[in-house]
Image: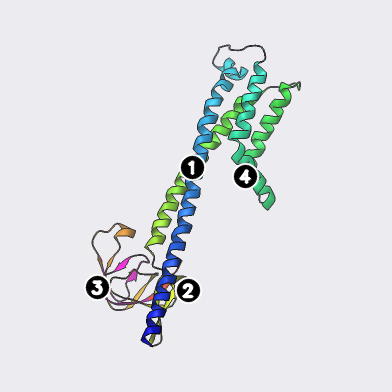
Amino acid sequence: IHYDHEEHKEHTNHDHDEHHEHKEHIHHDHADHHRQMVRDFKKRFIISALVTIPILLLSPLVQQLFNFRFGFPGEKYILFALSSFIFFYGGWPFLEGFFDESKKKQPGMMTLIALAISVAYFYSSAVVFGLKGKFFFWELATLIDVMLLGHWFEMKSVLGASKALEKLAQLMPDTAHLIKGSEVKEVKISELKKGDKILIKAGEKIPADGLIVKGSSYIDESMLTGESKPVHKKLEDKVIGGSVNGDGVLEVKVEGTG
Protein backbone atom coordinates (compact mmCIF):
# COMPACT_ATOMS: atom_id res chain seq x y z
CA ILE A 1 0.00 0.00 0.00
CA HIS A 2 2.88 2.28 0.88
CA TYR A 3 4.40 1.62 -2.58
CA ASP A 4 1.14 2.51 -4.35
CA HIS A 5 0.88 5.74 -2.39
CA GLU A 6 4.44 6.75 -3.30
CA GLU A 7 3.83 5.81 -6.93
CA HIS A 8 0.65 7.91 -7.00
CA LYS A 9 2.49 10.86 -5.43
CA GLU A 10 5.28 10.62 -7.99
CA HIS A 11 2.72 10.40 -10.81
CA THR A 12 0.86 13.45 -9.44
CA ASN A 13 4.08 15.45 -9.13
CA HIS A 14 5.00 14.45 -12.69
CA ASP A 15 1.60 15.69 -13.94
CA HIS A 16 2.05 18.97 -12.06
CA ASP A 17 5.53 19.45 -13.56
CA GLU A 18 4.17 18.77 -17.06
CA HIS A 19 1.28 21.20 -16.50
CA HIS A 20 3.68 23.89 -15.23
CA GLU A 21 6.03 23.35 -18.18
CA HIS A 22 3.09 23.51 -20.60
CA LYS A 23 1.88 26.75 -19.03
CA GLU A 24 5.36 28.29 -19.27
CA HIS A 25 5.64 27.12 -22.89
CA ILE A 26 2.33 28.84 -23.80
CA HIS A 27 3.38 32.07 -22.08
CA HIS A 28 6.78 31.96 -23.81
CA ASP A 29 5.20 31.45 -27.26
CA HIS A 30 2.74 34.30 -26.61
CA ALA A 31 5.54 36.71 -25.67
CA ASP A 32 7.65 35.61 -28.65
CA HIS A 33 4.73 36.34 -31.00
CA HIS A 34 4.38 39.89 -29.63
CA ARG A 35 8.14 40.47 -29.78
CA GLN A 36 8.15 39.37 -33.41
CA MET A 37 5.29 41.76 -34.22
CA VAL A 38 7.11 44.65 -32.51
CA ARG A 39 10.24 43.93 -34.57
CA ASP A 40 8.19 43.62 -37.77
CA PHE A 41 6.35 46.95 -37.34
CA LYS A 42 9.59 48.70 -36.36
CA LYS A 43 11.41 47.39 -39.45
CA ARG A 44 8.53 48.26 -41.79
CA PHE A 45 8.24 51.76 -40.30
CA ILE A 46 11.97 52.59 -40.60
CA ILE A 47 12.26 51.32 -44.19
CA SER A 48 9.00 52.98 -45.28
CA ALA A 49 9.98 56.29 -43.63
CA LEU A 50 13.30 56.31 -45.51
CA VAL A 51 11.55 55.62 -48.83
CA THR A 52 9.04 58.38 -48.03
CA ILE A 53 11.78 61.06 -48.12
CA PRO A 54 12.27 61.03 -51.93
CA ILE A 55 8.49 60.78 -52.38
CA LEU A 56 8.08 64.00 -50.40
CA LEU A 57 10.85 65.70 -52.41
CA LEU A 58 9.21 64.70 -55.70
CA SER A 59 5.65 65.63 -54.74
CA PRO A 60 4.44 68.85 -56.46
CA LEU A 61 2.28 69.85 -53.48
CA VAL A 62 5.20 69.54 -51.05
CA GLN A 63 7.46 71.49 -53.43
CA GLN A 64 4.84 74.22 -53.71
CA LEU A 65 4.34 74.28 -49.95
CA PHE A 66 8.06 74.78 -49.25
CA ASN A 67 8.69 76.86 -52.38
CA PHE A 68 11.30 74.78 -54.15
CA ARG A 69 11.47 72.84 -57.40
CA PHE A 70 13.08 69.47 -57.80
CA GLY A 71 12.29 67.26 -60.76
CA PHE A 72 13.42 65.39 -63.84
CA PRO A 73 11.82 63.66 -66.84
CA GLY A 74 9.89 60.57 -65.80
CA GLU A 75 9.76 61.55 -62.13
CA LYS A 76 6.12 60.47 -61.88
CA TYR A 77 7.15 56.90 -62.65
CA ILE A 78 9.76 57.03 -59.90
CA LEU A 79 7.05 58.35 -57.59
CA PHE A 80 4.81 55.47 -58.67
CA ALA A 81 7.56 52.88 -58.08
CA LEU A 82 8.49 54.20 -54.63
CA SER A 83 4.86 54.51 -53.58
CA SER A 84 4.13 51.00 -54.85
CA PHE A 85 6.90 49.70 -52.59
CA ILE A 86 5.49 51.51 -49.56
CA PHE A 87 1.93 50.40 -50.38
CA PHE A 88 2.79 46.71 -50.69
CA TYR A 89 5.58 46.53 -48.10
CA GLY A 90 4.62 49.11 -45.48
CA GLY A 91 0.90 48.67 -46.04
CA TRP A 92 0.96 44.87 -46.05
CA PRO A 93 0.00 44.39 -42.35
CA PHE A 94 -3.12 46.50 -42.97
CA LEU A 95 -4.00 44.75 -46.22
CA GLU A 96 -3.52 41.38 -44.51
CA GLY A 97 -5.66 42.57 -41.60
CA PHE A 98 -8.35 43.65 -44.07
CA PHE A 99 -8.42 40.16 -45.64
CA ASP A 100 -8.66 38.55 -42.20
CA GLU A 101 -11.48 40.86 -41.11
CA SER A 102 -13.30 40.24 -44.40
CA LYS A 103 -13.11 36.46 -43.93
CA LYS A 104 -14.56 36.80 -40.43
CA LYS A 105 -17.12 39.34 -41.68
CA GLN A 106 -16.01 41.65 -38.87
CA PRO A 107 -14.74 44.91 -40.44
CA GLY A 108 -12.60 46.98 -38.11
CA MET A 109 -9.73 49.45 -38.05
CA MET A 110 -7.58 47.41 -40.46
CA THR A 111 -10.39 47.55 -43.02
CA LEU A 112 -10.62 51.34 -42.74
CA ILE A 113 -6.85 51.81 -43.10
CA ALA A 114 -6.65 49.35 -46.01
CA LEU A 115 -9.50 51.10 -47.85
CA ALA A 116 -7.92 54.55 -47.32
CA ILE A 117 -4.47 53.55 -48.59
CA SER A 118 -5.90 51.47 -51.46
CA VAL A 119 -8.06 54.32 -52.77
CA ALA A 120 -5.11 56.75 -52.57
CA TYR A 121 -2.74 54.30 -54.26
CA PHE A 122 -4.95 53.09 -57.11
CA TYR A 123 -6.33 56.56 -57.89
CA SER A 124 -2.82 58.09 -57.96
CA SER A 125 -1.57 55.19 -60.09
CA ALA A 126 -4.38 55.83 -62.57
CA VAL A 127 -3.32 59.50 -62.74
CA VAL A 128 0.26 58.42 -63.55
CA PHE A 129 -1.02 56.41 -66.50
CA GLY A 130 -3.35 59.00 -68.01
CA LEU A 131 -6.30 59.80 -65.74
CA LYS A 132 -6.75 63.54 -65.17
CA GLY A 133 -6.21 64.50 -61.57
CA LYS A 134 -3.58 64.94 -58.87
CA PHE A 135 -1.26 62.45 -57.19
CA PHE A 136 -1.81 61.48 -53.57
CA PHE A 137 1.42 59.54 -53.24
CA TRP A 138 2.93 61.61 -50.43
CA GLU A 139 -0.32 61.47 -48.48
CA LEU A 140 -0.39 57.69 -49.02
CA ALA A 141 3.22 57.28 -47.84
CA THR A 142 2.87 59.47 -44.75
CA LEU A 143 -0.43 57.81 -43.79
CA ILE A 144 1.20 54.37 -43.92
CA ASP A 145 4.21 55.67 -41.96
CA VAL A 146 1.99 57.13 -39.24
CA MET A 147 -0.08 53.94 -39.01
CA LEU A 148 3.05 51.78 -38.80
CA LEU A 149 4.49 54.02 -36.09
CA GLY A 150 1.23 53.88 -34.13
CA HIS A 151 1.00 50.10 -34.38
CA TRP A 152 4.67 49.73 -33.44
CA PHE A 153 4.10 51.68 -30.19
CA GLU A 154 0.82 49.85 -29.60
CA MET A 155 2.49 46.44 -29.92
CA LYS A 156 5.29 47.59 -27.57
CA SER A 157 2.71 48.43 -24.92
CA VAL A 158 0.86 45.16 -25.56
CA LEU A 159 4.16 43.31 -25.08
CA GLY A 160 4.74 45.14 -21.79
CA ALA A 161 1.24 44.24 -20.58
CA SER A 162 1.72 40.66 -21.77
CA LYS A 163 4.97 40.36 -19.79
CA ALA A 164 3.21 41.66 -16.67
CA LEU A 165 0.40 39.13 -17.10
CA GLU A 166 2.92 36.33 -17.62
CA LYS A 167 4.72 37.24 -14.41
CA LEU A 168 1.39 37.28 -12.58
CA ALA A 169 0.42 33.90 -14.04
CA GLN A 170 3.77 32.42 -13.00
CA LEU A 171 3.09 33.51 -9.42
CA MET A 172 -0.03 31.34 -9.28
CA PRO A 173 0.33 27.74 -8.08
CA ASP A 174 -1.01 24.89 -10.22
CA THR A 175 -3.07 23.22 -7.50
CA ALA A 176 -5.08 24.03 -4.37
CA HIS A 177 -6.18 22.09 -1.28
CA LEU A 178 -9.98 21.99 -1.56
CA ILE A 179 -11.86 21.37 1.70
CA LYS A 180 -14.83 19.03 1.22
CA GLY A 181 -16.48 18.36 4.58
CA SER A 182 -13.83 16.70 6.74
CA GLU A 183 -11.61 15.84 3.77
CA VAL A 184 -8.98 17.86 1.94
CA LYS A 185 -8.61 17.16 -1.78
CA GLU A 186 -5.89 18.44 -4.10
CA VAL A 187 -7.40 19.99 -7.25
CA LYS A 188 -6.24 22.16 -10.14
CA ILE A 189 -6.87 25.86 -9.58
CA SER A 190 -8.90 25.92 -12.81
CA GLU A 191 -11.45 23.70 -11.01
CA LEU A 192 -11.98 26.17 -8.15
CA LYS A 193 -15.33 27.96 -7.98
CA LYS A 194 -16.54 30.99 -6.07
CA GLY A 195 -17.59 29.91 -2.60
CA ASP A 196 -15.17 26.95 -2.39
CA LYS A 197 -13.20 26.63 0.83
CA ILE A 198 -9.47 25.98 0.49
CA LEU A 199 -6.67 25.15 2.90
CA ILE A 200 -3.43 27.11 2.61
CA LYS A 201 -0.46 25.69 4.47
CA ALA A 202 2.55 27.62 5.75
CA GLY A 203 4.86 28.79 2.97
CA GLU A 204 2.40 28.02 0.14
CA LYS A 205 1.26 30.40 -2.57
CA ILE A 206 -2.35 31.50 -2.31
CA PRO A 207 -4.16 30.04 -5.36
CA ALA A 208 -7.09 32.49 -5.59
CA ASP A 209 -8.49 35.73 -4.21
CA GLY A 210 -10.58 35.06 -1.13
CA LEU A 211 -11.66 35.77 2.43
CA ILE A 212 -10.04 34.20 5.49
CA VAL A 213 -12.62 32.11 7.41
CA LYS A 214 -10.17 30.47 9.80
CA GLY A 215 -6.66 31.20 11.04
CA SER A 216 -4.25 34.11 10.76
CA SER A 217 -0.85 34.60 9.19
CA TYR A 218 1.59 37.07 7.70
CA ILE A 219 1.21 37.28 3.90
CA ASP A 220 3.98 38.29 1.51
CA GLU A 221 2.34 40.48 -1.16
CA SER A 222 5.56 42.13 -2.37
CA MET A 223 5.40 40.67 -5.90
CA LEU A 224 1.84 41.98 -6.35
CA THR A 225 1.57 45.25 -4.43
CA GLY A 226 5.22 46.24 -3.92
CA GLU A 227 4.77 46.17 -0.13
CA SER A 228 8.14 44.93 1.16
CA LYS A 229 6.97 43.82 4.60
CA PRO A 230 4.62 40.83 5.09
CA VAL A 231 1.07 41.95 5.92
CA HIS A 232 -0.74 40.42 8.90
CA LYS A 233 -4.03 38.85 7.85
CA LYS A 234 -6.72 37.57 10.20
CA LEU A 235 -10.32 36.36 10.17
CA GLU A 236 -12.46 38.03 7.44
CA ASP A 237 -9.45 39.76 5.85
CA LYS A 238 -9.03 39.42 2.09
CA VAL A 239 -6.08 37.62 0.52
CA ILE A 240 -4.78 37.98 -3.04
CA GLY A 241 -4.09 35.08 -5.37
CA GLY A 242 -0.36 34.78 -6.07
CA SER A 243 0.76 36.13 -2.69
CA VAL A 244 2.69 33.83 -0.34
CA ASN A 245 1.42 32.60 3.02
CA GLY A 246 3.75 32.94 6.00
CA ASP A 247 4.00 30.55 8.95
CA GLY A 248 0.28 30.23 9.69
CA VAL A 249 -2.34 27.83 8.34
CA LEU A 250 -5.37 29.45 6.71
CA GLU A 251 -8.79 28.41 5.52
CA VAL A 252 -9.98 30.73 2.77
CA LYS A 253 -13.33 31.11 1.03
CA VAL A 254 -12.72 31.67 -2.69
CA GLU A 255 -14.11 34.95 -4.04
CA GLY A 256 -12.35 35.19 -7.39
CA THR A 257 -10.68 32.76 -9.79
CA GLY A 258 -8.87 33.00 -13.16
When the figure is inspected, residue 132 is found, relative to residue 102, above or below; the finding is above
Place residue 138 in its image quadrant: top right
Q: Is residue 238 left or right of residue 39?
A: left
Q: Which residue is mark 4?
A: 97
Residue 113 picture location, percent across and down: 62, 39
Residue type, numbered disc 1: Val
Question: Which quarter of the figure has residue 134?
Answer: top right
Cα distance between the residues tagged 3 and 1: 44 Å
Mark closer to the chain start, 2 or 1: 1
Give the Cα separation between the discs numbered 3 and 2.
Answer: 26 Å
- 163 sits to left or right of 142: left
Percent coordinates x, y for residue 141 in the rendering: 59, 29
Q: Is residue 82 above or below residue 158?
A: above
Return the mark for residue 191.
Answer: 2
Q: Are marks 1 and 4 in contact (CB under 8 Å)?
A: no
Q: Nearer the viewer, mark 1 or mark 4?
A: 1
Residue 16, image quadrant: bottom left
Q: Which residue is mark 3?
A: 247
Mark 2: few, some, or many residues within 10 Å (few <14, many ≥20)? few
Q: In the structure shown, which secondary structural element does the residue marked by tag 1 occupy?
A: helix
Question: Which secondary structure, mark 2?
Answer: helix
In the image, which residues are magenta? 232-252
Mark earlier in primary sequence (1, 4): 1
Mark 3 or mark 4, earlier in chain:
4
Residue position marked by numbered label 1 in the rendering: 38
Q: Let me know if residue 109 is in the magenta part.
A: no
Residues at marks 3 and 4, CA–CA distance in whole angstroms: 53 Å
